[in-house]
Image (cartoon, helix red, strand yellow):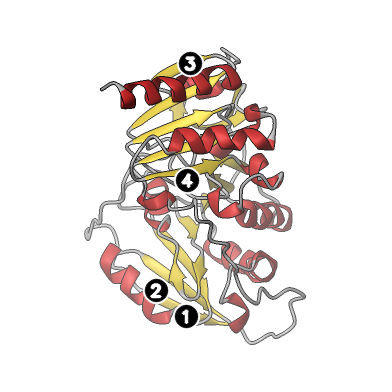
Amino acid sequence: MDKNRILIAETIENQISPSYKELLGFGASFHPDRESRILLIIPGQNVKELAEQIAMENNIHTLAIEHEDLRYPNPCFLEKILPEVIRENMPSYICLMHNVRTCQLAASLSIQIGTPCITGIESYEIQQEKTVFTRMMFNGKLIGRTACKTGPVILTVIPGSFSGSFTTDHSIQNGKTMIMKVHETVFGYKPVRIIETISKDNKLEEADVIVSAGMGIEKEERMELIRKIASIFSNAAIGGSRIVCDHGWLPYSCQIGETGKQVSPKLYIACGISGTMQHTAGMKKSGCIVAINKDPNAPIFSIADYGVVEYLQSFLPILAARYDDRKKNP
């Protein structure tokens, strides 16, 4: 095993996920020297030109894996063909951005090639010549630090957690593209389309202010309080945690987090949101974060600029009433 790193990107309809830049930055931070090499794997239906462009722009090696069943993300397909690719390259790290699909793929690869797997990485540091990875546990209440005794190591990285950026260095390697066309037709699973439900409340990426609801609202009817607060601001949108969307109180197009949308509004108001890593991964880059939660020990307060320890049903009506008073008597 050497210092090579394999990075596995995702594509949808032959368009690469923008998070691949963050993945490159994370992967390049390990052993950034002349002896190491990055291989970015780009699966898709027809991604040869895309892989060539990325190889040229970033001066890295790319591998385009092409098959019609890869038009949409397909972990069941990749888990059958990637073990051989990994064994041929013998990397020290195999890195993916963290989501439900890549976790499935990472776990399967870990079993097949017999290597450790750490999911949900937020950061790492070197301690006594060992790389120690940090991840949140038990809904953000505990921080786990893990170092592997053997390698290679498979890692999934929480989106938005790695602040580093990838810088092209033409002295390290001359980027080239390899093409792998897969001809097998039976893999047992084929995504046929992606359906995105659009909500009238949902303009999350364009909003200057997002008022977001968590299970701390307790009842669906309290969503009206969230909408009332959002109406105070111009160019505002409503978001929610995954469990709120699972309950059907908001459509999944409003979900913010690692399996939802990543947002960075000027103001983010978190209402009854505990602050698990799954949610904060989608909003931690907000300009100003205001957290309202009855639990003074909620993890959301660790990243909030302003915190309000109070019951939502008590605080939000007061906030709305004060706004109405100011509006009537400016």
Nearer mark to the viewer, of 2 and 3: 3
Identify whether 151 is placed above or below 327. Answer: below
Q: Amino acid at mark 2?
A: Ala
Q: Amino acid at mark 1?
A: Ile
Residue at mark 4 to residue at mark 3: CA–CA distance:
27 Å
Query: Under tag 3, what secondary structure?
Result: strand
Identify residue for label 1: 179
Point 40% across, 28% down: residue: 289
Residue at mark 2 to residue at mark 4: CA–CA distance:
22 Å
In the rendered structure, are the residues bearing label 4 and label 1 in contact, judged by CB atoms less than 8 Å apart?
A: no
In the rendered structure, are the residues bearing label 2 and label 1 in contact, judged by CB atoms less than 8 Å apart?
A: yes
Q: Mark 2 or mark 3: which comes first in sequence?
A: 2
Residue 124, visible in the rendered structure: no
Quadrant of the frame with the C terminus? top left
Query: Under tag 4, what secondary structure?
Result: loop
Point 38% across, 37% down: residue: 285
Identify residue for label 3: 308
Identify residue for label 2: 51
Identify whether 311 is placed above or below 185. Answer: above
Query: Under tag 1, what secondary structure?
Result: strand
